[in-house]
Image (cartoon, rainbow, N blue to C red):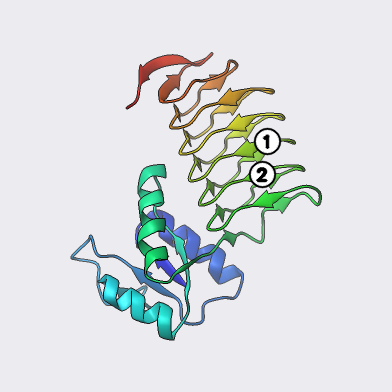
């Protein structure tokens, strides 16, 4: 598998893959940081250009996952690596607790350590559900959204595409959060949130509109 990125989140994804015993032919990709080269941790090759990634997909392993946060950039990286033959692949921690009924997890998701997912939950493509987060029943989460650590999403909530929910935020039951929304860390959301807005506070209120 190819992990896009070599920063902090990529290293967390590495641990999920390590614990699943899928380290064979594992490589990283970083064409941004010039000082990052050679092998990560002295073991895993770092590819530096898209041609090398294309060759890797063709001759080694066509799977890739994104070890970079941020809804917009994750969407762009998905397009970039899919275009050269990559197969967007989920990484799911063995410590995640995932219910047995009615759940759907899209391609390329990163479900991290000690996440609790109950039943009848639909998670879209390329979503991050970070450590210690809990997701209640009958929740939908749209493509490329990022749920930071220790978030609590209550039952019967709809989360749109490219939503960022900050660390420790609480989403109360029966709410709809639109597309391209930012929920600040520690916010308590008790009302619906429209598209393209940033909300913060206890209770959360609109702080600004996002283009």
Q: Which mark is residue 98?
A: none
Q: Which residue is at the front of the view, 13 or 177? A: 177
Q: Residue at x 49, y 60 (%)?
A: 13
User: Label 1 crowding class (10 Å Cα cut-off): few <14, some 14-19, many 20+?
Assistant: many
SS type, badge 2: strand
Residue 194, relative to residue 139: is it above or below? Answer: above
View extreme (front): residue: 83
Residue 77 screen position, x and y as percent: 37, 56
- Badge 2 vs badge 1, beta-carbon distance below 8 Å: yes
Name the side, left or right, on which 139 lies relative to 54: right
Residue 104, relative to residue 82: is it above or below? Answer: above
Q: Residue at x 56, y 60 (%)?
A: 90
Q: Which residue is mark 1?
A: 139
Q: Which residue is at the front of the view, 197 or 168? A: 197
Q: Residue at x 53, y 58 (%)?
A: 108
Name the side, left or right, on which 193 lies relative to 46: right
Q: Which residue is mark 2?
A: 122
Residue 63, relative to residue 104: is it above or below? Answer: below
Residue 160 screen position, x and y as percent: 53, 34
- Label 2 to label 1: alpha-carbon separation: 6 Å
Total number of numbered discs in the rendering: 2
View extreme (bottom): residue: 59
Figure quadrant of the C terminus: top left
Name the side, left or right, on which 44 lies relative to 187: left
Q: Residue at x 53, y 41 (%)?
A: 149
Residue 186 screen position, x and y as percent: 50, 26
């Amino acid at each position: 598998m190819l992990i896009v990125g070599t920063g902090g989140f990529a290293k967390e994804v590495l641990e999920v893959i390590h614990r699943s015993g899928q380290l064979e032919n594992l490589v990283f990709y970083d064409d941004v940081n010039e000082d990052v080269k050679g092998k990560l941790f002295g073991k895993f090759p770092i590819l530096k250009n898209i041609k090398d990634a294309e060759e890797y997909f063709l001759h080694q392993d066509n799977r890739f996952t994104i070890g970079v946060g941020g809804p917009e950039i994750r969407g762009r990286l998905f397009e970039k690596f899919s275009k050269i033959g990559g197969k967007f692949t989920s990484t799911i921690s063995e410590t995640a607790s995932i219910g047995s009924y009615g759940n759907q997890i899209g391609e390329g998701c990163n479900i991290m350590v000690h996440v609790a997912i109950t039943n009848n939950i639909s998670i879209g493509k390329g979503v991050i559900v970070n450590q210690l987060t809990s997701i209640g029943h009958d929740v939908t989460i749209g493509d490329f959204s990022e749920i930071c650590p220790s978030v609590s999403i209550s039952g019967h909530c709809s989360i749109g595409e490219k939503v960022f929910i900050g660390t420790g935020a609480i989403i109360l039951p029966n709410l709809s959060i639109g597309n391209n929304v930012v929920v600040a860390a520690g916010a308590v959301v008790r009302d619906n949130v429209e598209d393209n807005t940033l909300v913060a506070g206890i209770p959360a209120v609109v702080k600004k509109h996002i283009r």
